[in-house]
Image (spheres, rainbow, N blue to C red):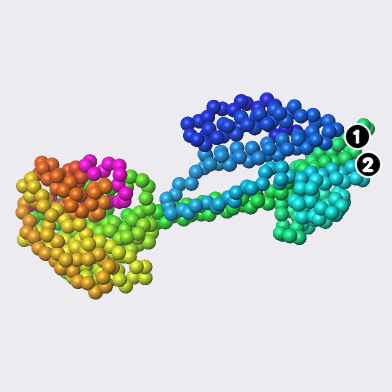
Amino acid sequence: MPSHLSADRPAAQPPGHGPVDALISQTRRLKGDVDAVRRGTPADGTDPRERWRRALYDLALHHLDDLDQHLAQLRDDPPTAPGPSGPGPAVPPRHESLLSRVGSAEWNLLTDEVSWSGELYRILGRDPAAPPLTLDELPSLVLDEDRPGLTAMVTGCLVDARPIDGEFRVRRPDDGVRTVHMMGEPVLGADGSTASMWAVLRDISELRRCRREVGETRDSLHHRQDAARTEHRLAVELREAVLPSWRGSLRLPHDGPRALDVAAARLPPSAQQPAGGDWYDALELSDGALLFSAGDLTGRGAGAASGMVMLLGAVRGMAMTGTEPGPLLTCLNRLLDATVRPALGSAVCLRYRPATRSLVWAQAGHPAPLLFRGGTGRVLDAPRGVLLGAAPGSSYGQTEETLEVGDLLLVHTDGLVPGHAGATAVHRLLGLARGFAAARTAQDCVRAVVREFGEDGRADHACVLVARVAS
């Protein structure tokens, strides 16, 4: 039987930097060693024991070929997803040795004698007391659709002296259909004709089941990855369709003697994450007031993004009708409670009147804005307000501040300061007061925030909006 490895195959490469590369190198060295021993085994077919050994070397090489391919797949095509994937199929422990799963047979064409090993009876589900089947009787065990393939293999071996290497399925009376792999060769007589045929048969049902589960799991993984990529693209498109399109600094209102210098940014997480439900917004209202809002809806992907779009649209619509921040959040809480998909969210809403420099604001379980004045900063005293969707029927208070020229207002979502929350995060943000005082524009202040808190370690997206009273 031809060797599975060429005699002049290249030498195994040294182990790579990773453990899988090292295993691949070890497997290929072992394949070379097994093949070298196999080539030293007599191939004249006169000694049944040597034929048996040679067949086992071939089976061992098949196993090593499979192992080499699986390790290469593990190295070259690892799973990317974040997405949200479970563990692969568990492979049952192999309690049997290689020999216990392999049976042998020989059919003597000159004497019509047939010999089967005991293990072959177990593989084919035959009574050990029954006589072994002839080559003509063997197809009776095989499923109808596999019989032509078996017949072609046997005919090619007997007529054309071709080696047998193929699979077929048998129906056993005890545990149903099993898959059998058959390898064999003809034994030629002195006149060159086929005198007998020997074969090694192996029950590979468990191997095929494992391979099938691996393939199904791989297909399922690819499907989930495709779905995750599609959902991520949809979420990003939803965000880009509704969030402010301006970049750099923005003057609000566009006309008038008193204006705010506004800038904002969205800081990405350290690792690839699906788009979330966080937002920031700056909007000039029809009555000349300005609306600033920020928030974060629980969840990720298209569901969170679509929920965010709904909330932001509601905020803008109610603000345009003149609704004050406290009643606005009260309505937003009712809206979130009435949605089909339950969710929680935090939000802060600020309404600024340039003519009086008065700021009315409300919050729903959200970090309070920070006010920087004269080189120092403080947290604005927050009115009452629970998370949106947490308590149906809740009402939200509001409070008022009067700003001065040069004041700087910082609005942000949770997670702006990586690894810190609550008072610690606020303390670090207030530490930027001196740098803010020296900054010329709101955009400079946003850049300072990004420099300070844009390092690795962020677990989720975060938004920051800065509004500076320019006049």
Answer above or below: position of 84 versus 54: below
Q: What percent of the width, then of the height, locates residue 347? A: 23, 61
* Residue type (three-letter) at the residue carrying disc 1: Gly
Residue 283 placement (x, y as % from top left) = 20, 59
Q: CA distance from mark 1 to mark 2?
A: 10 Å
Q: Name the kind of residue labelled 2 in the image.
A: Leu
Circle 2 is placed at which residue position? Answer: 110
In the image, 211: left or right of 445? right
Q: Secondary structure at mark 2?
A: loop
Question: Which image quarter holds the N terminus?
Answer: top right
* Magenta-tinted stretch: 450-471
Residue at position x 71%, y 49% in the image: 203
Q: Which residue is mark 1?
A: 189
State left or right for residue 77 relative to residue 176: left
**Which circle's residue, 1 or 2, is located before the other in the chain?**
2
Label 1 secondary element: loop
Residue 451 lies in the magenta stretch? yes
With respect to residue 149, does 302 lie above or below? below
